[in-house]
Image: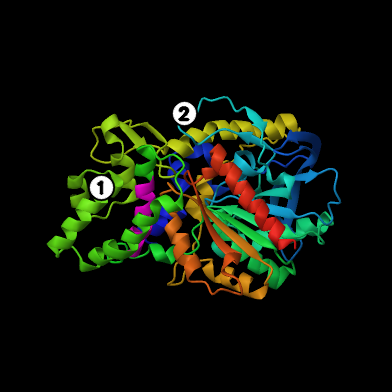
Amino acid sequence: MTRSLRLAAAAFALVCLAAGPGLAQEAGGRPNPTALPPDASAKATVVAADDTLAYKISVEQVPMHDPKGEKVAEIVVTSYVLDRTDSTKRPITYAFNGGPGASSAWLNFGGLGPKRLAFGNQGNAPSDPPSMVDNAETWLAFTDLVFVDPVGTGYSRATGSTDPFYSVEGDVSTLSRVVAKHLASKNRLMSPVYLAGESYGGFRIPRIARELQSRDGVGVRGLVAVSPVLDFSIRDGEQTSPIPWVNALPSLAAAKRERDGKRDLTRADLADVEAYATGQFMTDLMKGPRDKEAVERLVARVSELTGVDSEQTRRLGGRVDIAAFAREFQRGQGRVGSLYDANVTSFDPYPASRRGEFDDPILDGARAPLTRAAVDFYARDMGYRVDRRYELISGEANRQWKWGSGRSSPESAGALREVLAADPKVRVIVAHGATDLVTPYMESKMVLDQLPAFGDPARAALKVYPGGHMFYTRDGSRAQFTADVKALYEATEK
């Protein structure tokens, strides 16, 4: 696995690996044998943007069995179903987070579910009380929601070996079966089905959709991929290929422009950077370090766009990697930025160190309040008390993940092509934050630009919002994102 692939694929591992055994399963990777409690349900209401919504919450186990009928996993799903409608025909959305090894709490309590926790922005702190508020932008207004925790995340677990679940192919096979089984058990096979996924979850959903189409007999009407990597291969070869650097530069420039006062940054504000990155920047990178004039052009323009000191930019040959940027961007103030949004910063614990040694300000800052909020929700609100640790981010799952043994890096762009080609009604939104350094929006632009039109190029749309990897934690971005997603649902229901 290349350095770039390790950095992106282990996006959540930055915190997982530093968290120590407190977030892991029992020693040696053996699953905790403690049984899950019975399924639980409750009634609640939320004041949404246009209405007060009454709904039913359910926390349920979806068991997985091997060919012999032995239970091999217990997948916990959390669903929200609107009360006053015929649920058998209402849209239903299955949501997955990333990692691999992240629970669904990020999307559930961050932007999609009926209750929301503030996290991931400048000023939020690990000691903040986990106070939930009504989410005016909840997707429950136009779709029922099911948040899925894969094996090793949340309270989901394998009853034996985790090997069948900790791989690209095994994960997709398992989660497609979870969707199909849940639909059948809840009499929702007549409902329009949608998939949403964040980060590695965004990588998952085209493959899950294709698996559902081709194996499980379930058609998926729409996909919403949040901050995904659709093709890891475009990150390969960073020592020789200009592509990884071209794709990263607009996000670095976005971070600087936002820091300098442009708060509601749009793609239109970055048009000049995109043009430079795919034009003169790429040309000068192709010339290589032996062309001194090209290097000087790179240094001058990249330093101007990123705000990184020209001498540091020169040492990097105009190739400013995201880890160096996060360290250098506000080093003069003794602060380090998050790879997930460079403008969310914390104090550098070792400011004199030659190498950056710090936890990520967003993931480390969000872990405590989000974990507390999730455990409190399940135990107090739902009466679903589990005698084992809630795995918000599982370092164990991330470390043990099998990415495949072939020559090619994993990708889901091929599955996305096949889903769009097979069903002319499918629509897709690929959503990114402008200042996300882990999954730069230009990577998805590159993938989507290479898709055939399939009758209508707008069927697969790129959306870029102010903010980082979890851009939905910003109020304005969450509102616009929800409006765009609602429009997708309305378009697919015609």
User: Mark 1–mark 2 contact, CB under 8 Å?
Assistant: no
| 1 or 2: tag closer to the N-terminus | 2
The span from disc 1 to disc 2 (Cα, nearest Å) is 28 Å
What mark, if any, has residue 123 been given in the picture? 2
Q: Nearer the viewer, residue 151 or 224?
A: 224
Q: Position of 258 compared to 28: left or right?
A: left
Q: Quadrant of the C terminus?
A: bottom right
What mark, if any, has residue 13 been given in the picture? none
**Residue 449 seen in the figure:** yes
Residue range highlighted in magenta: 242-254
Q: What is the magenta segment's predominant secondary structure?
A: helix
What mark, if any, has residue 304 been given in the picture? 1
Q: Quadrant of residue 177?
A: bottom right
Sort mark 1 into few (<14), some (14-19) or many (20+) by Cα contacts within 10 Å. some
Residue 482: in magenta span: no
Q: Quadrant of residue 339?
A: top left
**Residue 212 location, x and y as percent?**
69, 66
- Kindly identify the amino acid type of the residue bearing the numbered disc 1: Glu
- Kindly identify the amino acid type of the residue bearing the numbered disc 2: Gly
**Residue 28 location, x and y as percent?**
52, 47
Colouring of the image = rainbow
Q: Quadrant of the N terminus?
A: bottom left
**Residue 117 location, x and y as percent?**
60, 33
**Residue 95 location, x and y as percent?**
65, 51
Residue in the picture at 73% in, 39% down: 50
**Residue 316 seen in the figure:** no
Residue in the picture at 30% in, 47% down: 306
Sort mark 2 into few (<14), some (14-19) or many (20+) by Cα contacts within 10 Å. few
Residue in the picture at 64% in, 42% down: 108
Mark 1, mark 2: which one is toward the viewer? 1
Q: For mark 1, give the secondary structure.
A: helix
